[in-house]
Image: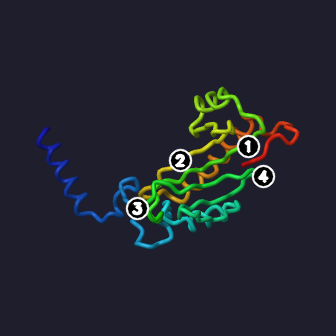
Amino acid sequence: MRICMKTRLIALAALALTAPVTSLPATAQFAAMPEAGEESAPQVVDATDPELIARILRNEGFKAELKTLASGAIEIESEYDGTSFWLYFQACTADFTGCEVISFSSGFDFETAQLPDIIGDWNHDRYSKAYLDEDGDPFVEFSVNMKGGVTRENFVDTLHWFTTEMSAFIEQIGWNRDLSGQAQPI
């Protein structure tokens, strides 16, 4: 019986090796790899092309104002639901062309300094990072490693994730409450 089973297995293996791929069950077939440059391949974006990042924001309905600072650093100013936020290109080469990280950031200018407890509570429960600047104004930010690129779909999802976090942060710090002109977005 063992010899018969071995013989069958060898015969099935030989048949599988010589049979055309289309005769294999659907679960055993491999999808054809797309040719280089075909549209079906996911678009990969990284932090080396700020104009592409700005176009993606615009395509998603956001404003995107690309700015080059005096130092040569690049940033994009955007807005969500009436609140400004920025994308900073970081971990760059000396000439700011080879950036690896994008940080999403939004800050809120209060007339009086905010209590550190607000920030500690936020950082305990969230993936984004919150902090108070030297004036006690709260900021929320999220940094994304873009080295090697991420899919466009992943980047867009991260953008929407940040705006969701930013909205929750606004609620956490009381930005939406009636502050009688005591707070202004930075």
| 122, 57: nearer the viewer | 122
Residue that protrudes farthest toward the right in the picture = 180
Q: Which of marks 1 and 4 is nearer the N terminus?
A: 4
Q: Callout 1: few (<14), some (14-19), or many (20+) C-alpha neighbours within 10 Å? A: some
The residue tagged 2 is 143
Of badges 4 and 3, the one in the foreground is: 4
Q: Earlier in the sequence, mark 2 or mark 1?
A: 1
Q: What residue appears at the point 65 percent right and 42 percent down from the top-left corner?
A: 139
What kind of element bears circle 4? Answer: loop
Label 4 close to label 3 by CB (< 8 Å)? no
Q: Residue 82 carries which label?
A: 4
Q: Which mark is residue 83?
A: none
Q: Which of marks 3 and 2 is nearer the N terminus?
A: 3
Q: What residue appears at the point 14 percent right and 44 percent down from the top-left corner?
A: 4
Q: In which quarter of the view is residue 18 placed?
A: bottom left
Place of residue 62 in the rendered image (x, y in percent of width and height, measured from the top left): 70, 60
What kind of element bears circle 1? Answer: strand
The residue tagged 1 is 109
What kind of element bears circle 3? Answer: loop
Of badges 3 and 1, the one in the foreground is: 1
Kind of residue at disc 2: Ser
Rounded to the nearest whole Å, what is the CA distance between mark 4 and mark 3?
Answer: 45 Å
The residue tagged 3 is 31
